[in-house]
Image (cartoon, rainbow, N blue to C red):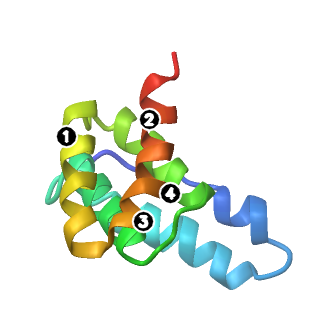
Amino acid sequence: MAKKIVQTAGRDALGEFAPDFARYNDDILFGEVWSRNDVLSLHDRSLITISALVASGIIDSSLKYHIQTAKANGVTKAEMVEAITQLGFYAGWPKAWGAFRMAKEVYEAK
């Protein structure tokens, strides 16, 4: 059975400024797509999302959020290290360095 994902980050950050975009983020991206975790696990969705962000050069708070979410979704430190190492070859070494700095911070936090 799928776990329903509830997200309010869109509305919290952009609800008044861009209400439609906020709704798409919270209700469609998370409420519908991420909630289809009976088809593709949250673990795997997290790794895919991190890969897409790193490959796109998005090395900011959104990447950190998704690394934290990945950890909560059961992605181990070893899996994260392996994924980012492979991304270094396909997406770019500097992008991997940036991602490693964030991953290290998240996985070393108590």
Q: Residue at x 51, y 70 (%)?
A: 58
Real-space Cα separation, disc 2 to disc 4, in angstroms: 13 Å
Sequence order check, earlier mark of 1 and 4: 4
On screen, residue 107 above or below 33: above
User: Looking at the picture, how far across and down is residue 83, in whole percent?
Assistant: 21, 52
Real-space Cα separation, disc 3 to disc 2, in angstroms: 15 Å
* Residue under label 1: 79
Sequence order check, earlier mark of 3 and 2: 3
Query: In the rendered image, which quarter contains the N terminus?
Result: top left
Amino acid of disc 3: Pro
Compared across the picture, whether 49 is left or right of 68 comes to left
Q: Residue at x 18, y 59 (%)?
A: 86
* Residue under label 3: 94
* Total numbered circles: 4
Q: Residue at x 42, y 55 (%)?
A: 97
Compared across the picture, whether 77 is left or right of 12 comes to left
Mark 4 falls on what kind of element? helix
Q: Residues within 10 Å of mark 3 (few under 14, many from 20)?
A: few
Real-space Cα separation, disc 2 to disc 1, in angstroms: 13 Å
Amino acid of disc 1: Glu
Of residues 13 and 67, the one drawn nearer to the viewer in this rendering: 67
* Residue under label 4: 63
On screen, residue 9 above or below 76: below
* Residue under label 2: 104
